[in-house]
Amino acid sequence: MNNFKNRNNTKGNLEENKTTLYRKELQNKTLELQKALEKQNIKITFDANSFKDYLAMPRIISDNIYCGNILIYYKPTRNTYSLKKQLHSHDSEIGAIIDSTWNQINSFEIHPTESGIYEIFVDGSYIAGVTGYGAAIYLGDEIKAEISGTIPDTQFRQFGGELKSVIEAVKWCTNNNVKKARINYDYQGIEKFVSGEWKAHNSLSKEYSDFIRKAKIKIEWRHIKSHTGNLRNDKADSLAQKAAIRNK
């Protein structure tokens, strides 16, 4: 790896390229990540050239060595950010710290192992006429189960997969004597059908809400927007997609 050479990060330099789309939003998010990573002894630096339309590309510095780049994407239609890493080394520790810090500043933290509360991430996918579902179940940082499959009724497309993923995850919890779990979802019907905020008008949503209400585990709910760089959420999405593709 090459030793890092300081670059000019002056205010004037950052004020270049004012026509870059969403530079202000990306700069604010980059500064937020920069401040949080400093507490972990990891520096990220950037200048005006680090910003493109919808994208920020700050540099990663550890022990005064340039380790690669972080790619921060902004989706204005959803007002969401996602992150990818381009590390020049295979330093998994740095990557893990960046992922953990990103989760922290975006309120993606999970319950610690000692809490006994399992974290369930669920998703559905509809690909070429096949509806897949996926669930990733964690206790702390340890993944306990990966659940996936397809459902024959495709009229509700990916939303059917979303609901099925929760049903199968709760069944797993029941069979494994799990008492408490938090379900992390992006489709809001997952919680709102159960709370009654959304009325269940079809057989699938009725079956789903009845099943969850009768479940013998204590459930917390957390809405996480899709494609925001949450690795566990992306895992559930990947499981659902692979199930649909596998059975296409």
Image: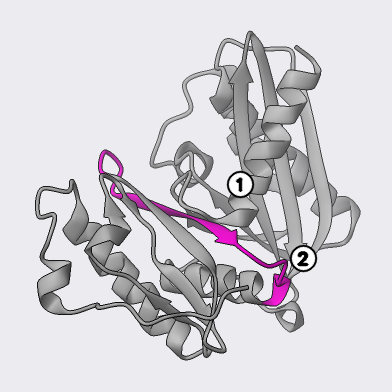
Tell me residue 108's x, y (percent): 51, 66
In this rendering, position of residue 187 left or right of residue 245: left
Please name whichever residue, 14 or 215, is drawn nearer the observer in this view of the structure. Answer: 14
For residue 219, above or below residue 91: above
Label 1 amino acid? Asp
Secondary structure category for the residue under label 2: loop
Please name whichever residue, 147 or 39, is drawn nearer the observer in this view of the structure. Answer: 39
Q: Residue at x 74, y 29 (%)?
A: 242
Between the residue at mark 2 and the residue at mark 1, the CA separation in whole angstroms equals 25 Å
Query: Which image quadrant: the N terminus?
Result: bottom right
Q: Is residue 152 visible?
A: yes
Mark 2, other Cα within 10 Å: few <14 / some 14–19 / many ≥20: some
Q: Which mark is residue 179?
A: 2
Label 2 amino acid? Lys
Q: Residue at x 44, y 69 (%)?
A: 59
Nearer to us: label 2 or label 1: 1
For residue 232, above or below residue 9: above
Q: Residue at x 47, y 21 (%)?
A: 201
Secondary structure category for the residue under label 1: helix
In this rendering, position of residue 202 left or right of residue 133: left
Answer with the quarter of the image where residue 127 lies.
top right
Q: How many marks?
A: 2
Please name whichever residue, 237 or 42, is drawn nearer the observer in this view of the structure. Answer: 42
Query: Which image quadrant: the C terminus?
Result: top right
Which stretch appears magenta? 76-93
In this rendering, position of residue 26 left or right of residue 165: left
Tell me residue 61's x, y (percent): 50, 79
For residue 244, above or below residue 182: above
Q: Is residue 140 visible?
A: no
Query: Is 127 inside the magenta-drawn segment?
Result: no
Tell me residue 172's x, y (percent): 83, 48
From the image, tell me which residue sits under label 1. 234
